[in-house]
Image: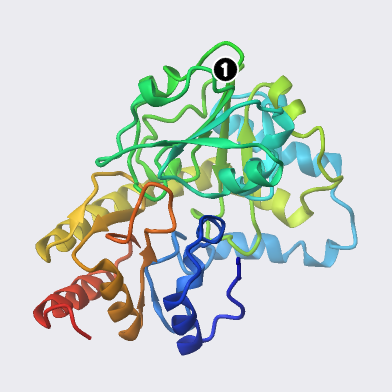
Amino acid sequence: MLWILGPHTGPLLFDAVASLDTSPLAAARYHGDQDVAPGVLDFAVNVRHDRPPEWLVRQLAALLPELARYPSTDDVHRAQDAVAERHGRTRDEVLPLVGAAEGFALLHNLSPVRAAIVVPAFTEPAIALSAAGITAHHVVLKPPFVLDTAHVPDDADLVVVGNPTNPTSVLHLREQLLELRRPGRILVVDEAFADWVPGEPQSLADDSLPDVLVLRSLTKTWSLAGLRVGYALGSPDVLARLTVQRAHWPLGTLQLTAIAACCAPRAVAAAAADAVRLTALRAEMVAGLRSVGAEVVDGAAPFVLFNIADADGLRNYLQSKGIAVRRGDTFVGLDARYLRAAVRPEWPVLVAAIAEWAKRGGRR
């Protein structure tokens, strides 16, 4: 049975999480926000800041009196043009999305016969394809979760891979990704966290390739989870196929304005500077986790995947202390030994709690 947690309310949430239905479908539907209750120190959700920057809030708020107006073609073009300039692409290679997750929901329009998803990975592609009656083959990577292209079926006509990958945080080489290209195949690269990597050296977003579809999220970087914004980059032909069945006016004016604003040069520069800061913070956090016995997976994303003795017991202990981390066993290819924690400046609190847990011998 699949049940979704209701309103997030403190102890009730924690009791519910402890008895989570971990059947495959329910596990795939599980997301980090289900570990978070009001007042909890949140390492479970990978959103960069607690709120959007003030300049963005002001820009969006200024549009509220205009909400009676339908989104116009000009609104769409402004969003497309900003993304196109950001990546050196053309307008017709850009598709604004209701978050990168909408891109996964549209994949069935490509009519794949055999889809392959490299896992551990974000669970939405498998859910979306399954809902459309398309079976996806899981290409399970073993620790340290580095891409092995030889394991991807040659006859797969749709391949989905994250870079950097959620939840492992592993950053694959662009040369490895390009090795996955085949005649008759569409390669989908989930780059939801690519702009957290300084310089984005392994990204394919700037490459105009006829068989590569790149999905990008602005939700995490700009703290817009409540607005849902992202975009796809691909050939006009692939984007046309992707949207053959899509609602009219899929994005509102606020979403389109946010996409244009977050892809403007000043915003891109600010995000890049923030990525450098977060990379240094990540290194400090990784060192701290390793100092208390955690085995950390090498990666580059704004979160850390680690395994530790009795991870489930530790997670429950952390919850009792008001600290939320993401369980790993709901991802295909991971088990109950793994936890994921977002990179946050409060990481010493997490490390201290783990140290206290270990000192108690793994008891509450």
Q: Is residue 348 above or below residue 25?
A: below
Give x and y (percent) for residue 255.
Answer: 70, 53
Q: Amino acid at mark 1?
A: Leu
Q: Nearer the viewer, residue 183 or 343?
A: 183
Give x and y (percent) for residue 123.
Answer: 52, 49
Q: Residues within 10 Å of mark 1 (few under 14, many from 20)?
A: few
Q: Is residue 134 above or below residue 287?
A: above
Give x and y (percent) for residue 267.
Answer: 52, 48
Q: Quadrant of residue 14?
A: bottom left
Judging by the rendered image, the residue that carries numbered circle 1 is 209
Q: Is residue 292 left or right of residue 72?
A: left
Badge 1 element: loop
At x 61% / y 70%, what residue is drawn? 3
Q: In this view of the protein, can residue 260 be seen by the observer?
A: no
At x 50% / y 44%, what residue is drawn? 192
* Furthest residue toward top: 183
What quarter of the picture does the N terminus occupy? bottom right
Q: Nearer the viewer, residue 212 or 81?
A: 212
Q: Quadrant of residue 39?
A: bottom left
Give x and y (percent) for residue 364.
Answer: 23, 86
Q: Is residue 132 above or below residue 357?
A: above
Q: In this view of the protein, can residue 199 be seen by the observer?
A: yes
Q: Is residue 310 left or right of residue 250?
A: left
Colour scheme used in the picture?
rainbow
At x 64% / y 65%, what residue is drawn? 58
* Furthest residue toward bottom: 11
Q: Nearer the viewer, residue 279 or 303?
A: 303
Image label count:
1
